[in-house]
Amino acid sequence: MILPIVAYGSPILRKISHDIDANYPGLEKLLDDMWETLYNSNGVGLAAPQINKDIRLFLVDSEQIFENQEEDEKGEYLDEPGYKGVFINAHIKELGGNEWSYNEGCLSIPKIREDVIRKETVTLEFMDENFVQHTKTFIGITARVILHEYDHIEGKLFIDYIKPLKRTLMKRKLDDITKGKVRVDYRMLFPK
């Protein structure tokens, strides 16, 4: 089932999410619905707060980025062919490498993209969909997608990294999103 994406301005997007255990009700169905929602909205990552759940859960599929690359972009990122997986109860252990800029967007903040500076590697401790514990280091574009989704479970948004002046200039667009004055080709849930 395709779930509505929570829009900017909804309080859940600013909440710090909590860990879950293997007995979380309906987890398998929730994961199936989240994957379906992700692909329906042409995203590469989706966090539980974006579907109105304050739990430490997100999905990433950076493989799509590599599958859809133009010829001149091939070989640009070291993490090819990308990574597809479920992250439950993720906690960052270490950030490393150089900082680099990339133009990010977010399903909860449609039609707004901005350059965001992030570290190039992240080491995470997390569980997969079978509650098997992992500690893995991710690099490149996959690390960026993971950090973007990780921010969601920490109550942060990519626009928090933007300079105040630029944020002021985009205030009207953000207000329009909050009011539901935005057209997208996926379901959205706007603040009341």
Image: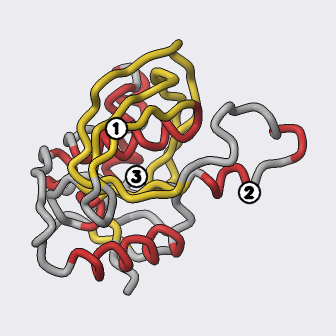
Asked whether disc 2 touches disc 3, contact meaning CB atoms under 8 Å apart, the reply is no
Q: Residue furthest right?
A: 71
Vertical order, 50 against 139 (above or below): below
Q: Amino acid at mark 3?
A: Ile
Q: Indicate the quadrant containing the N terminus: top left, top right, bottom left or bottom right.
A: bottom left
- Residue 161 screen position, x and y as percent: 37, 26
Q: Find residue 135 and name its label.
A: 1
Left or right side of 88 for 67: right
Can residue 185 be seen at all in this image of the molecule?
Answer: no
Q: Residue furthest top?
A: 98
Give the Cα separation between the discs numbered 1 and 3.
30 Å
* Between 178 and 69, the one nearer to me in the picture: 69
- Residue 186 screen position, x and y as percent: 47, 74
Residue drawn at x 81%, y 38% is: 73
SS at mark 3 in the image = strand
Q: Find residue 81 and name its label.
A: none
Residue drawn at x 82%, y 40% is: 74
Can residue 47 be seen at all in this image of the molecule?
Answer: yes
- Of callouts 1 and 3, the N-terminal one: 3
* Between 153 and 143, the one nearer to me in the picture: 143
Q: Which residue is mark 3?
A: 109
Residue drawn at x 43%, y 25% is: 166
**Marks 1, 3: nearer the viewer:** 1
Q: Amino acid at mark 2?
A: Glu
- Disc 3 crowd, CA 10 A, few/some/many (<14, 14-19, 20+): many
Q: Amino acid at mark 1?
A: Thr
- Residue 141 screen position, x and y as percent: 58, 37
- Of callouts 2 and 1, the N-terminal one: 2
- Residue 54 screen position, x and y as percent: 14, 58
Q: Which residue is mark 2?
A: 67
* Between 84 and 45, the one nearer to me in the picture: 84
